Image (spheres, helix red, strand yellow):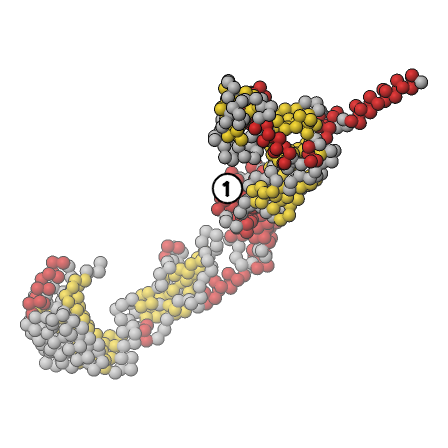
Amino acid sequence: MKKKKRLLGILLSLALVLGLIPGMSLTAYADDDPYAGIKNTTTVVKFDNKDWYLIDYDVSTVTLLSKECVGDASVFSSNQTNTYSGSAVETAVNNYYRDNISTTAKTAVNEIGMFLLTTDQTNTIGNAGRNVLKCNQASEADDNSWWLCSPGQDGTRAAVVLGASGGVNVGGIPVNYKLGVRPALKLNLSSVIFSSVNLSGGANAAISGGTATQNYFDMGNTRGAMTTVTYTAKTGYKFPETSELYKETNGITVTKTSDTVITVSGTPTATATSIAVPDATDPLADAKTSAKANLDTLQSGKNQNDYDAADWTTLIQAIANGKTAIDNATTIDGISTAKSNAESAVNAVKTKAQKLADAKTEANATVNAVNATDYIEADQQTVTNAKTTALAAIEAATTEEGVTTALNNFNNAIASCTTQAVADQIAQVMSEVSAKTGSGMTYTGNPIQLINTPTTALPAGYTMKYAVTTEKTAPMDESLYTTSIPTATDAGTYYVWYKVVGDDSHTDSEPACVTVTIEEQKQSQDEGDDTQQNPDGTKTVTKENADGKTILVTNYSKTDEQISQFVFKKANGTKLDLKNVNSKSLKTVVVPATVKANGKTYKVTRIRKGFLKNCKQATKVDIGKNINTIDKNAFNYGKKVKKVVIRGKLKKVGKGAFKNTKKNVIIKVQTNAKNFEKNKKLLEKSGLPKNATVKRVKNKK
């Protein structure tokens, strides 16, 4: 019976240990100490929906200090004593505990209830850091201090904490001051369960709802839900579309509800839970970073040794330019375009192997485009052999330079070969050369073109050259062949030799020949007349009158109609005066420097008065170089004359010689500077029209 009682006593003792305080061993000191990091810190701990600081703990209790003063300010004592027991401030503490701590919460509070701290307790807290002791001024308080339960230096003072600095005033303040009441209490750990949720991350976002750090005590052994925390991204920022942080950890879930909002909520299943929240980022900045990283990856995939130095520089510059364009982009599409352009530019830079392959492809195409059958029969085998050699050399080449050499050798090998098309074109050009015939092939005293030149152009690399002989024997001296169109002056028969001459890469054609004749000039049937056939088919007849004093120069058209007649009067020796010009159509009157008649050459030195009487339609007069005298009123009938050319040195200009020409007549003096000034003075002195202009025209060299 005694053994049974002893065994029952042991069991009851175990029951007391395990049953009456079931949370002690599990809650106070589990695997980690959950309170060490928050003791005597300003980390808020929630209990009974109020804010506290944890200031002490042991194996079975935690001591909490109200974060702020509670209720209204109170005097320490109304009877000038500094004993806490029975004081007015104790009553205030008890009343707050009675009215503001819930009934359920009171079951977890140690039997001592709510109390004020002592100076020893506050000094211990202050040694760890005064921030816990600081608080705001209580309502209706005389200053920002709060009461301790310890007496001051005399019977009328009680110790206080200075709320602004956290310093402890052991000497105290008079007990009749109204100061803050900041109570503390102890919780039995067997009656509560502690939860700590710490959130990190969430940069570039505002937090609302709960705080990032939540420490709280729930009654009993059932944990309560944390206060939901909402992260709202700053304007222009977004949370990532996917993240490994969107998950549940110890009952706490991180949820992305939109591009700009994340919520953290749930009921923790562990004492301490740390949660990382994704940072909100600027999509434009992220896109830029990603795009530039892609370009870096693209570059890292290239081997510098695979490129020529200049091409590698181009590639690196394309990367740099792409990054600059990405940095300057203002939209996602702009970034994408800049990245794509840079990638295209980089990929367009070819490696040495790619360039060699391209060169070979292009060279092979060039060689294969040449068909031996396009060449004259004599050159076809040469072209075929050159192609075979070139294609083998191109295939064997290990550098672009080698490909170029092979292609150049091929072009040189076939350069002297003639295609059938070129041969046909040369034959056509040769066939178009013919001798000139007709009225224009009569002696005039001037050079006459001997052949009709080809109208078809020669192929590149070829030139037509001509030589002229008086015997039908091809010239042996190559220097006699020139590119000049052949001409001759004297009457007779000429042999024009012509051939197509190739450059260093082309062969010459065989010379061909045409026979050309320049006829003797036919004499006029009128005795004493000098008739000159002009190259354009017209003719000029010079005749001296029977009186021996007048020479007539008459110009006829191709149909023998008179165009004009110049009447000259003989002067001293072999000098002539222009007396009259007869023409109904002549607009430009050319006064000759000399006239040939009856084997003599006469100088025309003078223009007489009214020489345009029978040529009033003339608008331009070109005066020969031997004219030195212009008579008074010479241009009496030149009302339409607006341009005059003077080619000689004047000695005399009669008064009013030019007055009847156009008012704005232009007189060009084609002589040297010295003679120009003399001519100009004579002209101006004669009396020119109001708006006349005299200007010099330099002699042509």
Q: Is residue 629 left or right of residue 336?
A: left
Residue linked to disc 1:
320
Which element carries disc 1, helix, strand or loop?
helix
Q: Is residue 577 above or below residue 1?
A: below
State whether residue 116 appears in this view: no
Q: Which x, y percent locates residue 650? A: 10, 66
Q: Nearer the viewer, residue 102 or 488?
A: 102
Q: Which x, y percent locates residue 553? A: 18, 77
Residue at the spot 45% in from the left edge and 56% down from the top edge? 461
Q: Amino acid at mark 1?
A: Ala
Residue at the far front in the pictured view: 79
Q: Which x, y percent locates residue 384? A: 60, 53
Q: Nearer the viewer, residue 447 or 231?
A: 231
Residue at the spot 38% in from the left edge and 65% down from the top edge? 495
Q: Is residue 682 left or right of residue 405?
A: left
Mark 1 neighbour density, 10 Å: few (under 14) some (14–19) many (20 or more): some
Q: Is residue 610 above or below residue 234?
A: below
State whether residue 536 appears in this view: yes
Residue at the spot 50% in from the left edge and 35% down from the top edge? 140
Q: Nearer the viewer, residue 586 or 449?
A: 586
Q: Nearer the viewer, residue 46 or 275?
A: 46
Q: How many marks?
A: 1
Q: Which x, y percent locates residue 521? A: 27, 74
Q: Is residue 226 left or right of residue 10?
A: left
Quadrant occupied by the N terminus = top right
Q: Is residue 651 above or below residue 169?
A: below
Quadrant occupied by the C terminus = bottom left
Residue at the far right in the pictured view: 1
